[in-house]
Amino acid sequence: MLRSAILAAARSSRVERLVAKAPLTRDVVRRFVAGAGTDDALRVTRELVDDGVQVSLDYLGEDTLTAEQAAAIKDEYLRLLKSLADGGLTPAAEVSLKLSALGQRFDEELAYEYAHAICAAAASAGTTVSLDMEDHATTDQTLDTLTRLRADFPGTGAVLQAYLRRTEGDCRELATPGSRVRLCKGAYAEPESVAFQSPVEVDRSYVRCLNILMSGPGYPMVATHDPRLVAIAEDRARWFDRPSDQFEFQMLYGVRPEEQRRLTEAGYTVRVYVPYGDRWYGYLMRRLAERPANLTFFARALTSRK
Ligand SMILES: Cc1cc2nc3c(=O)[nH]c(=O)nc-3n(C[C@H](O)[C@H](O)[C@H](O)COP(=O)(O)OP(=O)(O)OC[C@H]3O[C@@H](n4cnc5c(N)ncnc54)[C@H](O)[C@@H]3O)c2cc1C
């Protein structure tokens, strides 16, 4: 209930204005977002890379409504990739893209062209792109775009969401040699017709998908902070004789940093997803929906007069 309410608020511009004006919002945002500009993204990336962690950078912005906005987002990715390469931060750092930020909702072909340009810039910079997965209405379009991009850039990463009933089938399709697949639980409010609703069902689906990916010939990217799923992934890697450079763990910036350190020190590849930019509202609300404790922290910040 609470999760659905927060996810509904994530799409409300009235709540967005209220949240943006609250005095301590900036402190809460800072926990999950690297900062507003490219310099902030580069600084945080360097800190993480120096600590032996890999990075996937996301320039915030989703549900773009105009071609100008989509072009501006594409241009920022091109600038970012050049700066990453100039700073010697590739291939440790790659980028994550939301097709809705590139105009998918009003012009699918435009989003493909911009994503293609970003993949080409990433290839020149010696790194890769992963396509974030958004709500279920866009899954087919996003997977189609992925197939087209992979024809020219086979290293393009996919994201699959274990809460969707279809995902086991998608895992089978995408478990091909070299295929990079990020498996996450899924962060959007989805109806029962397409998605498992209870946490137990989602976790079971995650394990079934993990088994397919870890036993297959692709490159699984295990995106979760859930201690039980992390332990199961470690177990499956041993069981399927998968060496630590043949899969990776992924976590979000600001979430369970000690666990990120523990896994890195244990010799696993760990990649941290680092968002930056000033359009943080939808991203922040999804992080709040995931964990009631974050909401208490946030409510305190919203009501504080400081
Ligand atoms: C690298 C990465 C990329 C992702 N990309 C996508 C994507 O493209 N599309 C998509 O739909 N979703 C994406 N997600 C989000 C994902 O779907 C989940 O919503 C999110 O990861 C929470 O699920 P969980 O597996 O961590 O388990 P949960 O059951 O939510 O959490 C397990 C435990 O982790 C900790 N934790 C989890 N979330 C938080 C938080 N926000 N703050 C503090 N502690 C927390 C808590 O200790 C919690 O008990 C991504 C997640 C990661 C890590």
Image: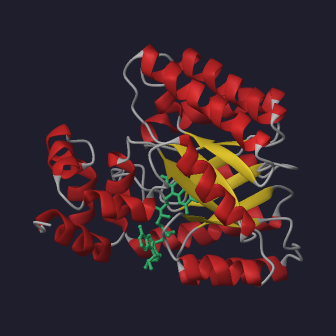
What residue lies at 89% left-to-right and 77% top-to-bottom? Answer: 241
Q: Using the image, determine if residue 119 lies above or below residue 28.
A: above
The mark total stands at: 0
What residue lies at 49% left-to-right and 71% top-to-bottom? Answer: 255
Q: Which image quarter is the N terminus in?
A: bottom left
193 sits to left or right of 201? left
Q: Return the x and y of residue 141 as percentages of the image width and height.
A: 55, 30
What residue lies at 45% left-to-right and 56% top-to-bottom? Answer: 33
Q: Return the x and y of residue 127 as percentages of the image width and height.
A: 79, 43
Closest to the observer: 184 or 9? 9
Work out whether residue 91 can be spotted. yes
- Residue 219 placement: quadrant: bottom right
What residue lies at 62% left-to-right and 50% top-to-bottom? Answer: 42
- Residue 221 placement: quadrant: bottom right
Q: Return the x and y of residue 19 as percentages of the image width and height.
A: 20, 52
166 sits to left or right of 261? left
Q: Using the image, determine if residue 254 lies above or below residue 99.
A: below
Q: Using the image, determine if residue 213 lies above or below residue 261.
A: above
Work out whether residue 166 can be spotted. no
Q: Which image quarter is the C terminus in?
A: bottom left
Q: How is the image coloured?
A: secondary structure
Q: Return the x and y of residue 5 as percentages of the image width and height.
A: 20, 57
